Amino acid sequence: MYLFNKYLHPANFAFARRIEGERILSDEAAFELRTAALGQDIYHIEIRNSAVWSRDDRTEQFCADFAAGSQERSMTRLEISTQAGLALFSHRGRPWLHAAGAHWFGTSGPAWLFRFERTPHMRFYGLGEKHVPFERSKRAYTFWNVDVWADHPAERVVQGDYDPDYISIPYLIIKQDNTYLGLLMDCPHAGMISVADDADLSGFLQAGSPYPPSILIGAEDGIPSLYVIFGPSLAELTRKFQRLIGTTPLPPLWALGYHQSRWGYGGDADLLRLAEQFQAHAFPADGLWLDIDAMDGYRVFMFDRRRMPRPAETAAKLAKRGFRIVPIIDPGILREPGYEVYDSGRQGRLFCLNPSGNEFIGMVWPGLSVFPDFSLPETRRWWAAYARRFLELGFGGAWIDMNDPSTGPVDCHGMRFDRGRAEHGAYHNQYALLMARATREGFKAANPDRRPFLLSRSGCTGSQRYAAHWTGDNFSSYRHLQRSIGKSLNLGLSGIPFNGPDVGGFGGDCGEDLLIDWVKAACLFPFLRNHAVRGSRDQEPWAYSREALRIMRRFVRLRYTLLPYLYNLFVEQELSGEAILRPLFYDFADSKALALGELDDQFMVGPFLMQAPFLTEWQQTRRVTLPAGRWLRADTGHWCEGGRRMIVKRDRRTSPLFVREGGLIAFQPGPRRDNRSNLNDIGLLCCVSRRFSGAAHCLYRADDGLSMDYTRGERSEVAMHARVVQKDLHLRLVTRRTGFGAIRITPFTVDPFPRLFMQQDGKRRELYAHPQRIRLTGQPFTWYGWR
């Protein structure tokens, strides 16, 4: 069994003594050293020895050519020598990363370690999905996908502090003042990254350690491979990293809406009841989700005919009402002769084997179960064929669960891959990615012109290419609400921007105040789904008081109002790798006066919206840090000066949301009573005051939000520019593309400008203000629509 509190220690490793050309020599062996400068301050280091690491089990290749077409001059140089060790220097000679002498790479059998110096002023972020504090210092971390509820003690999970988690991304962000560096371990085997002191590693050492403060990066097996990425800003670092590992394909617009799920929803009756309630309450929603109760005896790809006798008819009926069904898919296949999926997989020898060469058996929902060997291309093709038939029933997408892979009480280490030739560790962390890849291929085959939507529980580096991710089974508590902010922020910085928690918490009973606060906090997260465990109290918005329903509906409607803004963040993510949900120090410089690196209870949604939700049950006031600039309070319509901290009072009906001055925010005018959207007819909130002295810019894009036509030119683009000239607002709109038709734009302001001049594609006209009361998160305040 894997022990999550035990780590690789340098005392057990033989470190390289010297470097001779492209060879590293240690007391154990000689190794081939491969280094490559990929351009734009990205370096790749790989170490080979076929006698030690005979297989390359990596399924994702990260080899973007950053030098091609780039005019940027490198800001750093990587040096590796016996005298210098490994070091990354600026051109002025400042070391951003340093490993003293030759002691930067060591081995212990197939296990290996990179070791770098750690300085007191370093701070650490990233590391993918970790249910621990937002800033990562003073701990060691394990990278091994787990079924959290099955593999960790219940008290640790409830308390909200555990590692490892469902997703393994060994990517460390090093913050040194306002300069950032990223280290990516490109190895699928069980790994470790430690930024803990040696005494902290053991937990009980009293004597001083002979080892200096270090950053340790290593794995139990597999080819040693490390990417070194220099920012220098966090935004630049994130864009480079995201482009290296692959950006997230643009999802369908409906996937950005509100989703309702529950372990217990099992068929037609539940789905129709949900649709009726959402429509009756004018509560916009897109996805209605089915859990394992809809399966026929938990058989994957099969439905319980009593609960859902004609799935295609149900999907078509709900689609006419604007809803999409999202059913569950698990990898565990019931070992039952006569069950088509099992029989065909057995005939093709497509299942994982145990060390004896027989089918590996786990104990999951169906009972005794086998597991597809997704390391085999033929298995992925076989699975994709079933996924294709599944989607052709008319579903909107699917969610993939138990793909850690969870094997129940059975030790997973006996599950072997590649027809038994590969040990479990080679593909354990890659299992979810390979399953998602195969499922996505099936969905694309079912409808090549439609954007697939998949949600996955587990994953690894590269999973963002195939699926969105939710942050797994959490609990209904303020502790888990608080943790969800930093967890999603770091997951986004680690290459998986399309993520979010189970709103309200999956386990336990969610109280009314907690659900309200969770909806407020997560209403603009990249992914928004309310999900609850079977046997808990009802968690639908209408299951609480009328006041609670009104408050939650207001914030979900706010999400639909801002869908054009959110959607364009996803467009930019696909194109450049820009983060969607991000910490404040992504867009603003950190300082001693305003220590942004310590904030895990505020965050940016794109470059212009900042949330500062209440995350504690009895908290009546909270401190909000306002970075430099001016900020519009969305609950009052008042301007606030930045570069300071302020105190805001709790109001059950609203939540602190701020709009950064200089933002041009695309939105859908009018109340959003359902999920209908039109990206070609938008309002534009020009968030500038009469005191604004700069220039505001925005590139807005619109397409059909569903198909792949945008990749063939069917997308429209308008560049928007705004500035204040002698107290008048001048707005210039330049149409760049009309592949999806004309975009109709109605400007809005909060300040009552004397005049607004709009120049659109060379034609200038003066617009006139029409005051109206508009509500964002609090009481309505006056906006000025210009026509």
Image (cartoon, helix red, strand yellow):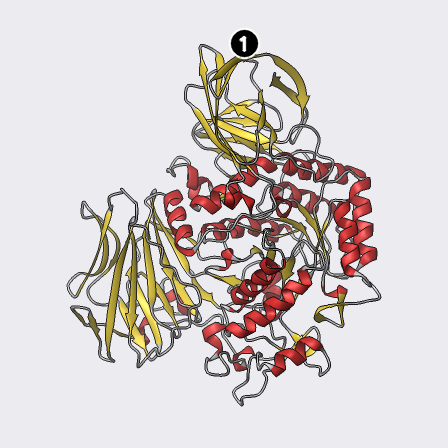
- Residue 79 coordinates in the image, percent (x, y): 20, 58
Amino acid type at circle 1 is Pro
- 744 relative to 374, above or below: above
Residue labelled with disc 1: 754
Dividing the picture into quadrants, the one containing residue 100 is bottom left
- Residue 777 placement, left or right of 58: right
- Residue 399 coordinates in the image, percent (x, y): 64, 59
Dividing the picture into quadrants, the one containing residue 283 is top right
Number of marks in picture: 1
- Residue 134 placement, left or right of 400: left
Can residue 35 be seen by looking at this rendering?
yes
Which sits in the foreground, 439 or 171? 439
- Residue 275 coordinates in the image, percent (x, y): 79, 47
Which sits in the foreground, 612 or 768? 768
Badge 1: residue crowd in 10 Å (few <14, some 14–19, many ≥20): few
Give the residue at x 64% y 78%.
344
- 609 relative to 515, above or below: above
Can residue 369 be seen by looking at this rendering?
no
- Residue 126 coordinates in the image, percent (x, y): 44, 54
- 502 relative to 422, above or below: above
Give the residue at x 34% y 66%.
225
> Which quarter shows the C terminus?
top right
- Residue 118 placement, left or right of 402: left
